[in-house]
Image (cartoon, rainbow, N blue to C red):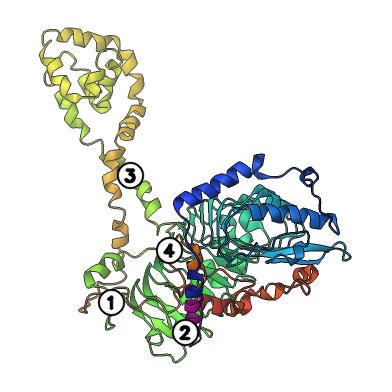
Amino acid sequence: MQAYGCFLVSFFLFSYFSSFSSALTDAEVSFIAHRQLVSLPEGGDIPDNYEFEVELDLKFPNTRLRRAYIGLQALKKAVYSDPLKTTQNWVGKNVCAYTGVFCAPALDDPEIEVVAGIDLNHADIAGHLPAELGLLTDMALFHINSNRFCGIIPKSFRRLTLLHEFDVSNNRFVGSFPDVVLEIPNLKYLDLRFNNFEGKLPPELFNKELDALFLNDNRFTSTIPENLGNSPISVLVVANNHLEGCIPNSIGKMVNTLNEVVLSNNKFTGCLPPEIRQLANVTVFDISSNTFSGIMSKTLKGLEKVEELDISHNMLTGFVPESICMLPNLGNFTFSYNYFNGKAQKCVPGSLKDVVFNDASNCLLGRPKQKSAKECYAVVSKPVDCDKAKCGGGHGPSKPSQPPVENPKTPKPSPELVPTTPTPKPQPPKEETPKEQPSKEEPPKVQAPKEEPPKVKPPKEEPPIKVQPPKDEPSTVQPPKEELPKEQPPKDEPPKEQPPKDEPPKAQPPKEEAPAPESVVPIFPPPIVQTPPPEPFGQSPVIQIHPQPPLVHSPPLVVVSPPPLVHSPPHHQSIHPHHHFILPHHQFTLLHHHQSTHLHRQCTRLHHQCTHLHQ
């Protein structure tokens, strides 16, 4: 009922905002991005004395408000479209009265007032971020989610040393990961989701003292850095990207802080690291829509506080144990669209009153909507040994290890080339032919640098060469006699190692036999399943939180999108725990903001349930 209420609120808000929102065309996006590139100073930052280069006729209570005025006016000029007229009253020296701008006493001098935050959430503004925003050095909050900002994050943002929360989600920012955020020392909340950022995730990101990290619905293409465990974050959401590789084993070091993990809809592979069982404080664990493999076993048994568990749409096999289905706080367990061929009775849908199970499209005997026997046998008969496997379920390392074992077999076809050389030649080099046989193709290689390079590359040319000068065979015999000392050194068999090097393509066919060792251990016999074919993805997980990537028209999409809102309609108060930090400008205090702690854990469950209901 609660989720249904969230859906209705989101639907009405979507309809409301869509009435005035308009999507940017590609031409408009390019125009805005070009405007930013032209306006940005060299290096994307402003000079240290920039404020003194700007002449103003207005007088301000203090120099900090003067700097804020310069930055806010630059932002207003960078606006391409403002259908809600949010910045219409951004006129005059009273910057604290500007819509979306909040002031508070300075931390280092309570006697003066400074701009402490900017909140333009859902303003539907199209434009870019000017470098002059780096002048607002007292700003602790910068929230512009659900707009149509384009371009990049300016380097001048590194000057915002007091910035605590940075939310630019649901816009149209582009480029690689904005490294400038790594230079903001007090940053705790980073939200970049629903943009077009791409490239690799920097390892330095997980060395920062962040509390929440939202990177979902971008175009990141890399592995998760191995130092993931160094991060003290409580919420990690990287869904709907192009990330690959395994989950780093260092995730076990996050036992005291990690509360939500959402890795869904990426390209992650391999087995689940055993360190996951150490995450006793995790309440949401979602690894759905990847290609994780192996036997689940008791890896997830340690998630004692987990409420939402989704491992669907992977290649997991084995038995679903009762220890997981009976976790004390479990409310929803989705393990559909895998290859499980057995499960405990307590894991059957409907067996527990307070837990929702989804077991569709597996290999479970007697259960409806399962995979066919043929489809199951292809995977179940080749179980992955997670003790030996690495990324990719162990298939990667096994292939290169086998070709060198079969290299001695590859020289066997080479004797076919040896009889061709002695047959046309009468036996003057009788003593040399047996010497040439062990080296096989190397005698022509010794003669090749002078006269017979074509013989090595196209073997078909050797017969015509041998047929044309049959009488000149003594001449062919004499060169080898003169080169006997040259042939003897290569007899030490190193040349034998070279032919195998030329024959990796012959060693590749055995690579296809890499799965053979796995098939030798068929732990699970081919299930005799005579059930109807699997139905389409009609029964999706109840708690599916990996939405479709947002459309280009971000404003209509954003209202129901996951970005947490700080100063927005009531339904977002349960999503964003920081709403209590944004108060009317006469009540907001920067000191209160910095002394308050992030209460992500109190609202994560509702956030998880309402995230992507716009699907």
Vertical arrangement, residue 168 with respect to residue 535, above or below: above
Magenta span: predominant SS is helix
Which amino acid, by three-letter code, is at mark 4? Cys
Q: Say what secondary structure mark 3 lies in.
A: loop
Residue 390, quarter of picture? bottom left
Frontmost residue, 506 versus 576: 576
Mark 1 and mark 3: span between their CA atoms?
38 Å
Mark 1 and mark 2: span between their CA atoms?
29 Å
Report the side of 406 relative to 105 (left or right).
Answer: left
Frontmost residue, 514 versus 545: 545
Residue to which mark 4 is pinned? 386
Residue to which mark 1 is pinned? 370
Which amino acid, by three-letter code, is at mark 3? Pro
Which amino acid, by three-letter code, is at mark 2? Tyr
Residue to which mark 3 is pinned? 403
Does the CB distance between marks 2 and 4 fall below 8 Å? Answer: no
Crowding around mark 2 (Cα neighbors within 10 Å: few <14, some 14 to 19, many 20+) is few
Does the CB distance between marks 1 and 2 fall below 8 Å? Answer: no
Frontmost residue, 563 versus 282: 563
Residue 5 covered by magenta stretch:
yes
Residue to which mark 2 is pinned? 4
Does the CB distance between marks 1 and 4 fall below 8 Å? Answer: no
- Which stretch did the figure color magenta? 3-12
